[in-house]
Amino acid sequence: MSTPEHDPQGLDVARQVARAARGDAAPPPRPRKRSAKPANDGPEPLGDLLKDVIDTQGWSTEVKLHHLLGGWTTLVGEVNAAHSVPESFADKVLTIRAESTTWATSLREIAPQLVARLNDQLGQGTVERVLVVGPTAPNWKKGRRSVPGRGPRDTYG
């Protein structure tokens, strides 16, 4: 009777422990799958595997962008970063939400420099425009019986 191969990931041991905890009998050993990769001296570093997945899926630009936006303070400065947050990135447009119209105006002034800095680090043409939006106004139209148009503006005076 041959001895089973060593399981470097420990999955077989984990399955045996789980079966023993449930009181199940051990199933017959399964034949091991051989990988197409040549064997190496040890496990492949997680960073290398993650980089391969990111490259294969085409996520590298988006991951780099999110990494850069993680350092939002270094991109726009401490004062601007305290009053704004990057909200989304779609169709080469980065949307930034500012907490007031004053901070939105301030960020609009540095938007061209921000596009240039992002494209320097991500590759030219990655970000075409920075859209800065202020806070959203409350919506007064509520319920099924709201009427289209400006509403009853003349009732207050």
Image (cartoon, rainbow, N blue to C red):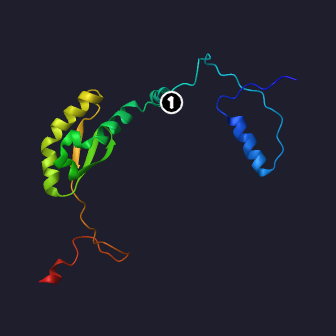
Choose between 87 and 5: the one closer to the eye: 5
* 17 left or right, relative to 87: right
Q: Residue at x 42, y 33 (%)?
A: 59
Q: Position of residue 55 (x, y in %)?
A: 45, 27
Q: Residue at x 27, y 42 (%)?
A: 94
Which image quarter is the N terminus in? top right
* 129 left or right, relative to 24: left
Q: How many tags in the picture? A: 1
Q: Residue at x 32, y 75 (%)?
A: 146
Q: Position of residue 32 (x, y in %)?
A: 74, 26
Give, as a three-letter code, the residue at label 1: Leu
Q: Is residue 71 above or below residue 134?
A: above
Choose between 92 and 14: the one closer to the eye: 14
Which image quarter is the C terminus in? bottom left
Choose between 89 and 86: the one closer to the eye: 86
Q: Position of residue 57 (x, y in %)?
A: 47, 31
* 37 left or right, relative to 33: left
Which residue is at the far right?
1
Choose between 156 and 133: the one closer to the eye: 133
Q: Quadrant of residue 35?
A: top right
Instruction: Read off the residue under disc 1.
Output: 46
| SS under mark 1 | helix
Q: Position of residue 128 (x, y in %)?
A: 24, 35
Q: Residue at x 23, y 45 (%)?
A: 131
Q: Quadrant of residue 139?
A: bottom left
Q: Is residue 50 above or below residue 147?
A: above
| Mark 1 crowdedness (10 Å alpha carbons): few <14, some 14-19, many ≥20 | few
* 9 left or right, relative to 49: right
